[in-house]
Amino acid sequence: MLPRKRAVGGEVVDDDSHKTEALLKKPRIGTLTLSSAPVRATSATENNNKDIGSSGENNCSDNNHSSSDFVGLPDMALGGNPPDIDEDLHSRQLAVYGRETMRRLFGSNILISGMQGLGCEIAKNLVLAGVKSVTLHDEGTVELWDLSSNFIFSEDDVGKNRALASVQKLQELNNAVLISTLTTELTKEKLSDFQAVVFTDILLDKAVVFDEYCHNHQPPISFIKADIRGLFGSVFCDFGPEFTVVDVDGEEPHTGIIASISNDNPALVSCVDDERLEFQDGDLVVFSEVEGMTELNDGKPRKVKNARPYSFALEEDTSNYGAYAKGGIVTQVKQPKVLHFKTLREALKDPGDFLLGDFSKFDRPPLLHLAFEALDKFICEVGRFPVAGSDEDAQKLISLAIAINLGSGEGKLEEIDQKLLRLFAFGARAVLNPMAAMFGGIVGQEVMKACSGKFHPLFQFFYFDSVESLPTEPLDPNDVKPLNSRYDAQISVFGSKLQKKLEEAKVFIVGSGALGCEFLKNLALMGVCCSEKGKLTITDDDVIEKSNLSRQFLFRNWNIGQAKSTVAASAAASINPSLHVEALQNRASPETENVFNDAFWENLDVVINALDNVNARLYIDQRCLYFQKPLLESGTLGAKCNTQMVIPHLTENYGASRDPPEKQAPMCTVHSFPHNIDHCLTWARSEFEGLLEKTPAEVNAFLSNPSEYTAAMKNAGDAQARDNLERVIECLDTEKCETFQDCITWARLKFEDYFANRVKQLTFTFPEDASTSNGAPFWSAPKRFPRPLQFSADDLGHLYFIMAASILRAETFGIPVPDWAKNPKKMAVAVNNVIVPDFQPQKGVKIVTDEKATSLSTASIDDSAVINDLIKRLEECQKKLPPGFRMNPIQFEKDDDTNYHMDFIAGLANMRARNYCIPEVDKLKAKFIAGRIIPAIATATAMATGLVCLELYKVLDGSHKLEDYRNTFANLALPLFSMAEPVPPKVIKHRDMSWTVWDRWILRDNPTLRDLLQWLKDKGLNAYSISCGSSLLYNSMFPRHKDRMDKRVVDLAKEVAHMEIPPHRNHLDVVVACEDDEDNDIDIPQVSIYFR
């Protein structure tokens, strides 16, 4: 797969132990856009990077805030969010597009002409995205043929107008989108009602007329023509004579923390080696916060040259500037790009460069350009598509292609692959579901680019084919004849023999989120598992949430709270009632191997992952490796997607190559020396969990069983136990709340502690002029010197922090929240009544500065004595509590904007950001970072699943070679499509044998240890060590182990390894260390001992 980075599933997991692997480094906050275009340039970050009102008390330079910053009210749970964007529904999409792009989409009117499979997929993606309106145009009626690729139609719709039959089910996806129909002939004048028009079933002559009208219209109407013909597809885009792309890639602007700047021509800028710089020669950057060489803080963009990992040169003479002293941030300036599109008439004659997807087919696009033109001419002359299997029709299309090529002048092809054109002709009438899903994602994204200027459009032709998906054996013309079934279109391409294999397949889909919903729909339309012999098992332990509805299209509002797998399976069965599906709610893991047992795995034909975290992917990969089952892997991250084929004995497995772990900020940086908003938000979420979840849970653990709890603390006797006891005592004694006013007092004192007292102590311990042990300034980059905040009830940022903190504190104590608590004026009066004690910094306070430290708790020799005193205090506190008193721990939930969780976290992070002069963020951006939300859009999901299902044809056919399979990395934002053969597994050879990671050696008939050793000896292998789990069953160095020779291996495992073998297991696995006769270690496969 190229590149070797994996995207991840678009679903969010709150379990940090199952975090996803990111494709890119975590984006930084802060963006700048340089624009001379009339449309204001924005990016996802810019749209979300609105500052909570700053009092300016820190004397932070204005340069700390980007030009896009907005100083105003924070987005609180009590109101303030723009009414036009449902952030609960669209949060994952907002993480990709930003508010400004979303608003443009919400104002866009789209026409889709042609409601066969491709038109349906495009419409689905646009309705999910939330455009203003979608008008469906089709003059034709539903045929049984259409059911191969269109998930909206059922057999009851046959004979109805396609557009009219589509409205109801599309409307269910998003009630905010106006869906209307046109069922009569389309006139070009009608196109003026739309910002973008898409044609999926139109002849070239008419397309040329419509495109010229759109191209010359004022303002231009974006025109897209897309076609799927069997396993071949094409897209053409014309967005007008002058189209401005305001954000070409959607990536966050790169930044760097400056370490030094030379007084030179050109100037050399060096940055700290905290992270590699991502600048490229020619990039424009701006400087801020530079001390000494303040001339660079003028906001003027400057050009980068000689970019290196940690330095670059400026095309500027700084010889006469002030000498650089310290500090400074350098930020990339994103520039708009103007594109000049040709009309379809011009582009047909002079197509320019084709967008290439598969480098092994670099000469394919010009041939397909010719093929689609020849097909159009065939339809005009004959009045129909070529018939599948008809040599006469194929030859006529080939003759037309040759004639067109002869008249192509300089664009004439030297050679025409007639075999490929023959395949093209045979499948020309069919719209296949996987192709529709893939191109539905691509075209849907192009429409959104046309309406928003976000991401670089496809310029201008894209051609794709997947002829490798065809059966390896030549198809008999009789095998592709229609059978009057819903699969006839697919049969016309693949034949009825492969169709039967699809229907009888045993498939396991792991996950029922965005990817899982798309896979279920695709498989139902393809007829996979749609016979009595076939079976589809899908499992997911999650339930449906509102935020799922913008991508997981099988779910509806009324399904919120229900099991994902059950609802999705039911919806898929409504698409194709023949689907034989079982829905489970089990997480596939070692704990559920009694459910997904050996018999289950051995019966499978293929496994499809639709997962959202790496650990689960690795587990399924290991199971597929063990049982030698094909695994089709995919993932998405924003506009990116990837697919990886894991085929037994042909490819490496998923876990064979791993991305490096994401770099984590040191604990001391997060707690005392933050230098970006990510650090502030990481700290804020940690404080939320400590204050509102862990400590109340700790209190309840004590109150549930005081003697057991205190005994456990005494036994631990460490700094962690001491800290736990101190926090419990705080809750039950020194900081106990009985009224809502107590909660306000607690919140106000927390503000003072966090944002004033701790900063005063830190700067007392490490003054601004402090030095390190080697004499360097302590507060050098990337450290930022903090300033304490002075509380003011007039500052809404301060006040809303108090409001959120006091409401959540009241919730933990079960204290009713009065209505006035959400009134800023009344809250200001209440908080001003709080008496705040003076604070004096102390000498000798230890503050962790070691970047390798993993805990802020410091051990002490008298920990046990302190713990005993704390336990006595705790027992006294317990006597004062009312009977049955318990606290209410609060688990963080990011997707409920009324619960004040994100208000509290955003307030914590932004106040801390003010301490350190770091640009603040609004609640939405805080939610993305603190909630660890994975950006996700329906278009990338659709494309990934379409690509995987093209590979599924190959897997179920069962006779394809390595070179037939494709791994894909795609980025719809650029757009980029990179397809490559999978990597083969590493081969180990010994004598005349060879094996890979896929091999597992099997011994049956319940062998003894002697039998196993002799069996290996016969292969020229001398076993010197045999282990089961963590126990050693045999080692040639231990004389006593020879007494075990005649024992059954399974009995040894029970006796020595104390293995408990469940009833569903009929074998056990041992790891054998071997040498050859020359004493060379040989790495052999895992050995399975079958005893039943």
Image: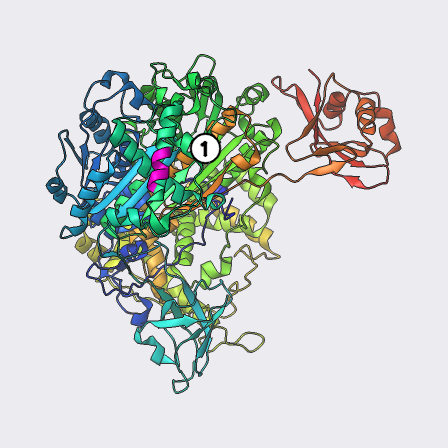
The foreground one among 212 and 854 is 212
Q: Residue at x 13, y 52 (%)?
A: 218
Q: Residue furthest top?
A: 532
Magenta residue check for 268: no
Residue 98, image x and y in percent?
Answer: 28, 51
Colour scheme in the image?
Answer: rainbow
Residue 380: give x, y in percent of width and height. 25, 31
> What residue is shown with label 1?
419
Depth check, front residue: 750 or 277: 277
- Seen in the picture, residue 725 relative to 468 is either above or below; the reply is below
Identify the magenta region.
Answer: 399-404
Drawn side of residue 674 relative to residue 341, left or right: right
Q: Secondary structure at mark 1?
A: helix
Pick the front one: 910 or 504 = 504
Q: Position of residue 748 (x, y in %)?
A: 31, 57
**Quarter of the picture holding the C terminus:** top right
Near mark 1 (Cα within 10 A), the count class, few <14, some 14-19 or many ≥20, is: few
* Relative to 890, 203 lies left or right: left
The location of residue 236, given as percent across then percent down, is 29, 44
User: In the orientation shown, which residue stands out farthest toward the right?
Assistant: 1039
Q: Nearer the viewer, residue 407 or 382?
A: 407
Task: Please state which amino acid type lies under the numbered disc 1.
Answer: Lys
The image shows residue 775, relative to residue 828, as above or below, that is below
Quadrant of the image occupied by residue 984? top right
